[in-house]
Amino acid sequence: MLSFDPKDLSTGRLHGYLLSAVAPRPIAFASTIDADGNPNLSPFSFFNVFSANPPIMIFSPARRVRDNTTKHTLENVEAVKEVVINVVNYDIVHQMSLSSTEYPKDINEFDKAGLTMLPSDKVKPFRVAESPVQFECKVNEIVNLGTEGGAGNLIICEVVKLHISDEVMNADSTINQEALDLVARAGGSYYSRAKRGFFEIPKPLRTMGIGVDALPEDVRNSMILTGNNLGMLANVETLPNKEEVAKFIANISERYPEIKTASHRRKHKLAQNYLSYGDVESAWKLLLS
């Protein structure tokens, strides 16, 4: 067995060991607003529930390891001591991942991730309408654990109202775990779907994905493509050019002889198939043909 003194490891290496070994971790999809009322949405896997009476949850936006900067979520709850913690199920996992992109402060991650802002009842931040369970919270305390990169900031929240979708409720008013279909975070690019196990999602681009709001209208409003499909398509920096699209269509014409005259619906179904294998580039070339 290998043994380490944390002080002998770089922060990045220690961070990786901690996240890979303490897993899977629940995800707090935290919605906040700044002092001017601008919304922010970001996921955090340093998160759990710690008390039922009073109902207390804690999540921790850590200082960035690479440059010791703080996250917008932390800055927002320092200014407006309210947050909505939305749970993440499999249906929105790619959109959640896309929202973790480090967009500038004036960018609305709800728009970039293609998620719907739902007004809360008791707090100012918006809820994620697509999330099956949403917790409106007041921030009781913020505990700073350090000043260097990687240091956590415990945001201690008290639940003041919770919302649970009818679709995940049993007849006896308990939550159906199978229907809830929660997703948890592990190390690297790994996630865990509670009822099926591990899968991978490529990390969001440092260069910033174009976002769901920048997708062509027929793609964004597709009756075939799911939210997860849109999240995958939106996590690209640029779209294929006309020459790349033409070459791709020529290459698949033998397999799909009707492709040049296929309907949007047919192309969207084929693109969805490519996405099921993680082939975002081919899906885009098909959609742009």
Image (spheres, rainbow, N blue to C red):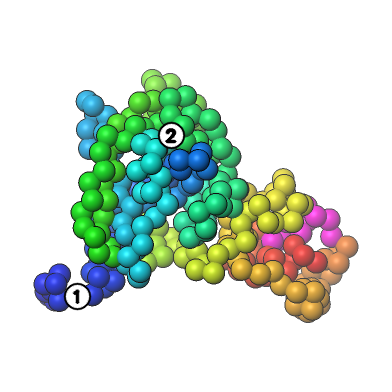
**Quarter of image, res 209:** bottom right
Residue nearer the viewer, 194 or 186: 186
Q: Position of residue 40 (x, y in %)?
A: 49, 46
Amino acid carrying mark 2 in the image: Gln
The local crowd at label 2, few if under 14, some if 14 to 19, many if 20 or more residues have their Cα within 10 Å, is many
Nearest to the observer: residue 22 or residue 197: 22
Query: Is there any visible trace of residue 175 in the rendered image?
Result: yes
Residue at 36% over, 62% down:
69
Which segment is the magenta one?
A: 262-271
* SS assignment at label 1: loop
Q: Is residue 169 above or below residue 25?
A: above
Q: Which residue is mark 1?
A: 9
Which dot marks residue 134? 2
Around disc 1, counting alpha carbons within 10 Å, would you say few (fewer than 14), some (14 to 19), or many (20 or more)? few
Answer with the quarter of the image where residue 13 lies: bottom left
Q: Are marks 1 and 2 in contact (CB under 8 Å)?
A: no
Residue 289 position, x and y percent, is 80, 66
- The answer to whether 84 appears left or right of 115 in the picture is left
Q: Main secondary structure of the magenta part?
A: helix
Relative to residue 130, is residue 281 drawn left or right? right
Q: Position of residue 270 (x, y in %)?
A: 71, 61
Across the whole image, how many numbered discs are drawn on residues? 2
Q: Amino acid at mark 1?
A: Leu
Closer mark to the observer between disc 1 and disc 2: 1
Q: Is residue 237 magenta?
A: no
Q: Which residue is situated farthest in the right direction here?
A: 261
